[in-house]
Amino acid sequence: MELQQRFEQAVAESKGLPERPDPMTLLKIYGLYKQASAGDVTGERPGMTEMVARAKWDAWNGLKGTSRDEAMGRYVDLIEELKG
């Protein structure tokens, strides 16, 4: 199966994981998804009062420079690991 198809399948499977991942893992999933689907983060870092948005931005920004294919592969691997 092609990487793009595996990624799309993993995105669908992420919605039905047996357990809700911990917050740090959720941020990792978010960052990998955004990097794979949109590339490097754009825009300004949210302010201190927007804690959730800021954490998401930081997770995505931490992957800056990662290729879309690498992000897709890491996303697929992480979802497979979480499925158990």
Image: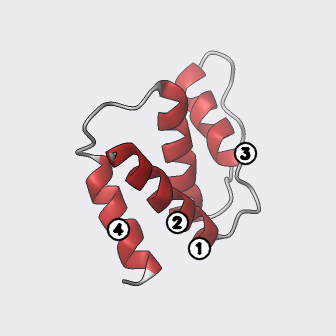
Instruction: Of the two numbered discs 3 and 4 on the same chain, state the one appearing first in sequence.
Output: 4
Give the labeled residue for mark 1: 69
Give the labeled residue for mark 3: 62
Residue 6 quadrant: bottom left
Say what secondary structure mark 1 lies in: helix
User: What whole-number distance in Å separates the C-alpha atoms at marks 3 and 1?
Assistant: 16 Å
Question: In terms of depth relative to the viewer, which is nearer, 36 or 48?
Answer: 36
- Label 4 amino acid? Glu
Question: In terms of depth relative to the viewer, which is nearer, 12 or 43?
Answer: 12
User: What whole-number distance in Å separates the C-alpha atoms at marks 4 and 2?
Assistant: 9 Å
Instruction: Of the two numbered discs 2 and 3 on the same chain, state the one appearing first in sequence.
Output: 3
Q: Position of residue 71 (x, y in %)?
A: 59, 62
4 relative position to 44: left or right: left
Q: Residue lying farthest bottom? A: 2
Instruction: Of the two numbered discs 4 and 2 on the same chain, state the one appearing first in sequence.
Output: 4
User: What whole-number distance in Å separates the C-alpha atoms at marks 3 and 4?
Assistant: 22 Å
Give the labeled residue for mark 4: 8
- Label 1 amino acid? Asp
Give the labeled residue for mark 2: 72
